[in-house]
Amino acid sequence: MASGSPPRPPSSDDATAPGLRAEDLRPQLPLFPLATVLFPQGLLPLRVFEARYVDLVATCLRRGEPFGVVTLSQGGEVRRAGEAVRFEPAGCLATILDCDSDQTGILQVRCTGQRRFSLIGAPREGGDGLWRADVQLLPEEAPRPLDPELQACADALGRAIQALAQRDQHPFLAPHRLDEAGWVANRWCEILPIPLSTRHKLMMLPDPVTRLRLVDGVLRRHALLD
């Protein structure tokens, strides 16, 4: 990865809130730019082989610390000489659940999403090849019950989970919170075939009910709801 993109100034659409505490600031958080969007409580499997990220995983495991996942808007996940890399100025903390290695130099890692964050200032690429940035953690999303008119989204997701389980696919961590608007919205966002930029915008929406209403609209347009 060769160059970074300074974050855009905050706008009225950003998921920021006044009055955040000093403990919500994380200086020089290591970043992992990926061609995906990590959501809170989401499951992220990684196959790690680049030395810089192998070292990152080892350090996070040793210290019990998270790293930040940011969504690529330009460039690839694997370093290529001379390639410009840009990523979104916000992302989600990732905590490592488990790590295994069945090949020398290759780690199979499972992570889960925690709190969302916004970058403060421009990210910088260090001599070790890792991107780092000062970040501000955003407020944790309080559980919101499903509105009755959105129950169909949860019912359809429950059926999808059962169908995937029958094929031995388990993309979501338990417990399955099918009675929470944010959990249902986030899990749909992870599996719906929507553009990466749209998925990222949905992740950063501060209101989970609004997020689920938008998902409901997508599902109905594609005739995925009864």
Image (cartoon, rainbow, N blue to C red):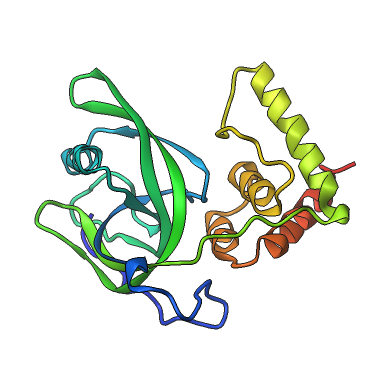
- From the viewer's perspective, tell me whether residue 3 is left or right of residue 66: left
Which quarter of the picture shows residue 190? top right
The answer to whether residue 109 shows anywhere in this view is no
Give the percent coordinates (x, y) of residue 76. 34, 49
Q: Quadrant of the N terminus?
A: bottom left
> Residue 129: x, y in percent?
16, 52
Which residue corresponds to the image point at 30% horizontal and 23% vertical from the top-left? 100
Q: Is residue 167 above or below residue 57?
A: above
Q: Residue furthest left?
A: 127
Tell me the residue at 18%/51% (across/down): 81
Q: Residue at x 78, y 49 (%)?
A: 219
Say which quarter of the image contains residue 193: top right
Quick check: can you spot residue 155?
A: yes
Instruction: Pick whichever, 43 or 106, lies toward us.
Output: 43
With 41 as the anchor, is 54 left or right in this view? left
Is 139 or 15 nearer to us in this picture?
Answer: 139
Give the x, y percent position of residue 205. Answer: 59, 66
Q: Is residue 15 left or right of residue 58?
A: right
Q: Is residue 156 left or right of residue 135?
A: right
Which of the 4 quarters of the picture holds residue 103?
top left
